[in-house]
Image: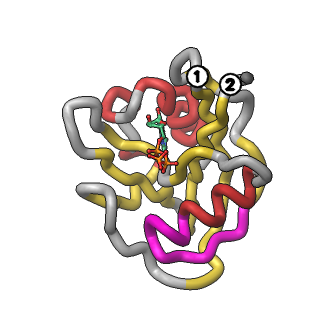
């Protein structure tokens, strides 16, 4: 069995990106999203997860560079996206926040997310 992909979504609106805080001891800022299920493409999983987690409809854009290993089992892929309908509603996360590029602090994010955050800091 291969590695399973976790898809994270960088929802961009104007000059800001949406961040979600994963609660708990292993917590930190992350991109909303989740595991790709069998038979799903990554963009399909991304659309489904954002609907489930935030109640929004998104259009998935380009991939933010190569994947990053989370563990032996999981690898993180991040896509840009924009909101087509709805306003994010917090359900599973402890906080939602829209950050400008200048406000992004890599160390506050889950470790696998940091290279993506660095990319967004340079070009949101
Ligand atoms: N959603 C998300 N998960 C991330 C990111 N960075 C990162 O290391 N992860 C890790 C945390 C979790 O161990 C794993 C994703 O699991 P998840 O619990 O969100 O996936 P899921 O919604 O499909 O949940 P489940 O039903 O399998 O429990 O990936 C990120 O930016 N977004």
Q: Mark on residue 73?
A: 1
Count neighbours of disc 1 (C-alpha within 10 A) and say few if under 14, some if 14 to 19, many if 20 or more.
few
Q: Position of residue 94 (x, y in %)?
A: 24, 56
Asked if residue 70 lies left or right of residue 7, the reply is: left
Residue at (57% x, 52% y) in the render: 10
Residue at (52% x, 39% y) in the render: 121
Q: Position of residue 62 (x, y in %)?
A: 77, 50
Q: Name the image quarter holding residue 48.
A: bottom right
Q: Is mark 2 within 8 Å of ligand 1?
A: no
Reply yes or no: does residue 56 show up in magenta: yes
- Looking at the picture, does residue 20 appear above or below residue 119? below
Q: Position of residue 112 (x, y in %)?
A: 50, 26
- Looking at the picture, does residue 83 appear above or below residue 70? below
Colour mode of the rendering: secondary structure
Between the C-alphas of marks 2 and 1, the distance is 5 Å
Reply yes or no: does residue 68 show up in magenta: no
Q: Quadrant of the N terminus?
A: top right
Tag 2 near tag 1, CB within 8 Å: yes
To which residue does mark 2 refer?
A: 3
Asked if residue 22 lies left or right of residue 10, the reply is: left
Span of residues in magenta: 50-60
């Amino acid at each position: 069995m291969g590695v399973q992909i976790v898809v994270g979504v960088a929802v961009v609106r104007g000059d800001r990106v949406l961040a979600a805080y994963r609660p708990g001891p292993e917590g930190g800022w992350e991109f909303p999203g989740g595991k790709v299920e069998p038979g799903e493409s990554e963009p399909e999983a991304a659309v489904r997860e954002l609907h489930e987690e935030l109640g929004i409809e998104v259009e998935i854009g380009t991939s933010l560079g190569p994947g990053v290993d989370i563990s032996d089992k999981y690898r993180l892929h991040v896509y840009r996206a924009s909101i087509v309908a709805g306003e994010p509603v917090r359900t599973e996360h402890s906080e939602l926040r829209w950050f400008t590029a200048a406000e992004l602090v890599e160390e506050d994010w889950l470790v696998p997310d940091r290279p993506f955050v660095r990319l967004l800091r340079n070009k949101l």
